[in-house]
Image: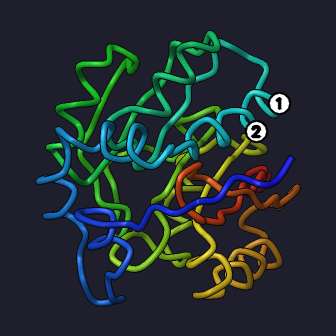
Amino acid sequence: MAPKQIKKQQQGPLKRVTLLEANESSLDIYDEWANDYDSDLVAAYGYRAPQLAVDAFVAMCTDRDALIMDFGCGTGLVGVDLASRGFNNVHGLDVSTGMLDVAQKTDSYAHLMVGDLTSTIDVADAAYDALICVGIFGNGHVTADNLPEMLRTAKPKAPIVIYLNDMAYTGLDYSSAFQKLASDGHWNIIGAETSNYMSELERPGWTLVGQNAG
């Protein structure tokens, strides 16, 4: 069977986010986009990065009672998928209050909070049994330099799953930055797998599976 021809072009908020420069913030875009985010990405573009990340997560974390942090939880797509797999002790953090308002309506999170990972967040060290995050790394978002702030909130040897697009992983060379953090003892990288995370667009991304130091 011939491969599916992917013909859609990104437009609207998705295009604006994609074209952000390093010194620009995505916050206003996500606040404005919050109510239409799921229909725009999932329905229009076949967005499946949350599912890919959760697939990797459930292979790493078998304890359904684990206290999990979903960094950059957005509208709660990861939380909904985790809940469908039996994980009901999930916290979510996002910089956008508009996104958090939508996530709250999913009833998939035990706790939601506002936080900016480019600075120190109000979360205790070693608070979480596992971490997951989808789509937060890149221009206008979180950089690889901010990963240690995330890692400090996880217990030693906690499972960690990160999904990010190839524009950040390869284009901005976050792959080298993540590896340097591993070499410096911040965490251990177990594996990295590439996939296309939108069925209606060519959007390559990466699932990184790791473990906190300790």
**Residue shown at 40% from the left, 17% from the top:** 108
Horizontal and vertical percent position of residue 70: 48, 39
Q: Could you tell me if the residues under marks 1 and 2 are in contact, i.e. CB atoms within 8 Å?
A: yes
Image: 170 above or below 89: below
Foreground residue, 16 or 211? 16
Q: x, y (%) of residue 212?
A: 73, 52
Q: Residue at x 83, y 78 (%)?
A: 183
Left or right side of 28 for 207: right
Q: Which residue type does callout 2 highlight?
A: Ala
Residue at 28 percent of width and 89 percent of height: 23
Residue 169, given in percent of the width and then of the height, sits at 65, 76
The answer to which image quadrant residue 19 occupies is bottom left
Vertical position of residue 156 compared to residue 116: above or below: above
| Residue at disc 2, secondary structure | helix
Task: From the viewer's side, name the closer residue of 205 and 141.
Answer: 205
Mark drawn on residue 79: none
- Amino acid found under the numbered disc labelled 1: Ala
Q: Please state if 196 lies on the left or on the right of 62 as rendered.
A: left
Compared to 203, does 46 lie above or below?
above
Above-or-below relation of 202 to 79? below
Q: Could you classify mark 2 by the number of other residues whose Cα lies within 10 Å: few (under 14), some (14-19), or many (20 or more)? A: some
The residue closer to the viewer here, 110 or 30, is 30
Q: On the image, which quarter does residue 22 sit in?
A: bottom left
Query: Which of the pair 196/185 is nearer the observer?
Result: 196
Callout 1: SS? helix
Would you call the spot at circle 1 few (<14 residues within 10 Å), some (14-19), or many (20 or more)?
A: few
Q: Residue at x 21, y 41 (%)?
A: 36
Q: Which residue is mark 1?
A: 59
Label 1, label 2: how many angstroms apart (C-alpha)?
5 Å
Q: Position of residue 144 (x, y in %)?
A: 56, 75
Mark 2 — residue? 56
